[in-house]
Amino acid sequence: MKKAVGGVVAAVVIVVAVVLLAMCSVKIPAGYVGVQYSLNGGIKGKVLSQGLHFVSPTTKVTKYTVGIEQSYLTKADKGDSPKDESFSASSSEGKAMTIDLTYTYQYQPDNVADVFSRFKGQSGKEIRDSFIKPNIISWTKEVIANYPVSDILGSKRAEVNTELTKYLSKKFEDYGITISNVSMIDVSVDKKTQKVINDKIAAQQDAETQEIKNRTAIADAEVKKTEAQAKADAQLIEAKAEAESNNKLSGSITDELIRMKEAEARLKHGWVEVTGSEATVVKDK
């Protein structure tokens, strides 16, 4: 009987020990840290890094991601956006747009204790849903209002995304939260506005194409002009050379040279000279 009671007591002790051990242990996943909060003394100075830790039963540990987390505000069920979280914003000319957006965030490791205090012990996910996402929407609208809808939908989308990243990063910095890589992944407008934008883009493309054709035609004309000028210059040089040669040849033909050539011809062909009353005729012998 005593052995049975002893066995029961031992089993109870083991169970209690296991329960206490479970209550006093906390596992911090990779990419997270934990802020310790004691019901007796408030926040403890040491922030827990990744791994298994043992704390007192009266200590609560709240986890915050210090790794980069992807977050979404989209119509589709994507990532941490299980319902329609797309939002509306207006361009500089007042055109309404529906925006799907993604961004990355993380809590600054050195400031997680301040984050815990500022947000009254909310977890990282609770802060994301109750603070980060609503302000991402609000502050994104401030940036969007500086751009015409044609820029947002057209070639300046990357520029707008860069400006969003800079602006939101600065806004959240004072809260111990780092925001990066903000990107509008889909922007839609009403059909009438979309048609106007498409027509404008088409007109711009036509104008650019015509400009390229004009530049090509001008370049071709310049090439032809250069070739014609080069040909004319070459002909002029050749003409000058020929004229100079003729001048030299003309200058070298003297009366003495003519008489010498005539003598050479008579000797070569056997010609004789017949003299009349008015003319001299040369005949063969």
Image (cartoon, rainbow, N blue to C red):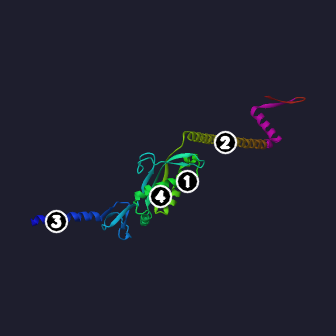
Label 3 – label 4 distance at C-alpha: 55 Å
Residue toward you, 269 or 235: 235
Q: Position of residue 71 (x, y in %)?
A: 43, 53
Give the residue at mark 1: 143
* Residue 237 to residue 54: above or below: above
User: Any mark on residue 9, and which?
Assistant: 3
* Residue 120 to residue 222: above or below: below
Q: Residues within 10 Å of mark 2 (few under 14, many from 20)?
A: few
State which region is magenta: 250-275
Q: Quadrant of residue 254?
A: top right
* Residue 54 to residue 219: above or below: below
Residue 133 is left or right of residue 276, and the answer is: left
User: Any mark on residue 218, and which?
Assistant: 2
Q: Position of residue 73 (x, y in %)?
A: 46, 50
Q: Tell me, yes or no, whether the highlighted magenta stretch contains residue 258.
A: yes
Q: Amino acid at mark 3?
A: Val
Q: Secondary structure at mark 2?
A: helix
Q: Tell me, yes or no, whether the highlighted magenta stretch contains residue 29.
A: no
Q: Amino acid at mark 2?
A: Ile
Q: Which of the two labelled residues, at mark 1 and mark 2, occupies the earlier sequence position? A: 1
Q: Which of the two labelled residues, at mark 3 and mark 1, occupies the earlier sequence position? A: 3
Give the residue at mark 4: 179
Q: Which of the two labelled residues, at mark 3 and mark 4, occupies the earlier sequence position? A: 3
Q: Secondary structure at mark 1?
A: helix
Label 1 – label 4 distance at C-alpha: 15 Å
Label 3 – label 1 distance at C-alpha: 68 Å
Label 2 – label 4 distance at C-alpha: 50 Å
Q: Which of the two labelled residues, at mark 1 and mark 4, occupies the earlier sequence position? A: 1
Q: Which of the two labelled residues, at mark 2 and mark 4, occupies the earlier sequence position? A: 4
Residue toward you, 72 or 199: 72
Q: Secondary structure at mark 3?
A: helix
Q: Position of residue 151 (x, y in %)?
A: 57, 47
